[in-house]
Image (cartoon, rainbow, N blue to C red):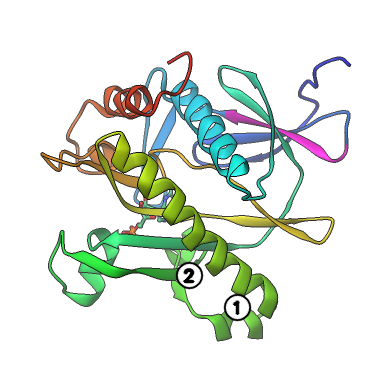
Amino acid sequence: MQPLSRLEKLYEGKAKSVYTTADPERLILHFRNDTSAFDGLRIEQLARKGRVNNLFNDFIMRKLEEQGVATQRVALLSDEESVVKRLEMIPIECVVRNIATGSLVKRLGVTDGMDLIPPTFEFFLKNDALHDPMVNDYHIRSFGWASDSEIAAMKETSLRINTILSKRFKEAGMLLVDYKLEFGRFHGELLLGDEFSPDGCRLWDIDTRKKLDKDRFRQGLGGVVEAYEEVAHRLGVPNI
Ligand code: 5GP
């Protein structure tokens, strides 16, 4: 079978573009070098970022699939492109936190860096204009963004992913501080969509607590892509 190629651009996100293909059930994700923060207010090009995020995301999605998590992953297409199932996305971000930092600390005034036992879970509405406000199960139901069973599955799967990935990162000398996931529907089944990369999670070195994720960009610390590549090396992502 011929590998799929891009037909039309369907959507351009802040760091990825999405293309249709000859197969109506498959899309191509193009991971770009664009790096954005503060709801797209600051955007910069960081060389090699598209490549490292694409290879990293593919590796994580494969590991999750191996552990029984259903994802949109189909195949790696090139250094910066992946083929995925075409999902009907749920406009909700699922955030799991193992350590308090970021918006949680701003909102609740809790100590930055404190362990969260058990881990905590939050839903946010995907809406840049509104700065992704936090929403609860009732909002999601009342506005018809997802059903009861989808809400339950998003929580359950997000926390199962936490068990799988926290262990893997720990073995590679890193703390999985927090992360954001998005889900979508495919023939009635809920699949993990979007991406898992250092753009959408926080990873700290286990000994020094050095930030190895997008906070390096948000906080102007430099060495952003170098940190992403270090994370990928430590995890054993091939071809980095
Ligand atoms: P916070 O709510 O503290 O800003 O973010 C919690 C976690 O979710 C962080 O790992 C952050 O990178 C991720 N996250 C939250 N919202 C977004 C978003 O809109 N885009 C991306 N890429 N990550 C997000």
Q: Nearer the viewer, residue 90 or 71?
A: 71
Q: Is residue 97 left or right of residue 63?
A: left
Q: Dividing the picture into quarters, in which one does residue 47 lie?
A: top left
Considering the image in quadrants, where does the N terminus appear? top right
The residue labelled by disc 1 is: 140
Look at 61% across and 73% down and name the residue there: 151
Task: Name above or below for residue 234 compared with residue 101.
Answer: above
Provide residue 68's location: percent of width, then percent of height.
Answer: 63, 49
- The magenta stretch is 24-30
Quadrant of picture, ligand 1:
bottom left
Q: Which mark is residue 45?
A: none
Q: Is residue 30 left or right of residue 37?
A: right
Considering the numbered disc 2 on the image, is that residue within a helix, a strand or a loop? Answer: strand
Tell me if label 1 and label 2 are in contact, CB under 8 Å: yes
User: Does the Cβ of the disc 1 residue fall within 8 Å of ligand 1?
Assistant: no
Considering the image in quadrants, where does the C terminus appear? top left
The residue labelled by disc 2 is: 123
The residue type indicated by label 2 comes to Phe
Look at 48% across and 70% down and name the residue there: 123
Decide whether residue 25 is among the magenta residues. yes
Look at 50% across and 36% down and name the residue there: 15
Look at 41% across and 69% down and name the residue there: 121
